[in-house]
Amino acid sequence: MVTSSLGSAAAPRTMPAGWTLRAVVTAHVAAVAGQPVFAGVYLTGDFDSLRLHAVGADVVTSIGYLQVIVAIIVWVRLRQAWPFLPTVAVVAAETVQYFAGVDGALWLHIPLGVMIVAALVVQFIAVWRLPLPRCPRARGEARDA
């Protein structure tokens, strides 16, 4: 716990790595939210939207891999492992969905897309709800009394 000079407990603050994770997760949610829109416009007969959906898939996938890197940095710098596993799960699902879409396996592509959007929204809420401070090491760092 962090204490001020007056001895009162200060609230933990989000570190720069945490803010970076928040920014990347926010961009990831924004990008993934466009995908069903492009798919829906395509289904109404605007066939150019399929190209936008494909470009959007490349953007979403790229941001997902960037999020994995940032989650690793958060794990190393802040000693917070919890963002890593959900990030890897979402990125693995996105990779499967990407190839299911390329192969035209809509039976997998559509429900997996719904699950990915839901998972990213939950992740977005999680990273913005609580501060991402640096956690003390299990051994080697003194804990405040």
Image (cartoon, helix red, strand yellow):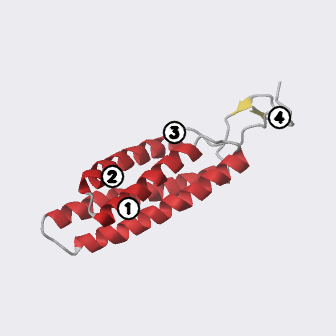
What amino acid is at disc 4? Ser
Is 44 above or below relative to 96?
below
Within 10 Å of disc 2 (Cα), the crowding (few <14, some 14-19, many 20+) is many
Q: Earlier in the sequence, mark 4 or mark 3?
A: 4
Instruction: Report which quarter residue 36 is drawn in.
Output: bottom left
Mark 2 or 3, which is nearer the eye? 2
Residue at horizontal 61%, vertical 56%?
70
Q: Earlier in the sequence, mark 4 or mark 2?
A: 4
Q: Earlier in the sequence, mark 2 or mark 3?
A: 2
> What is the count of numbered marks?
4
What amino acid is at disc 1? Tyr
Residue at horizontal 16%, vertical 63%?
43
Give the residue pinned by disc 4: 5
Q: Earlier in the sequence, mark 4 or mark 1?
A: 4
Q: Position of residue 137 (x, y in %)?
A: 78, 37
Please tell me which residue lies in front, 100 or 34: 100
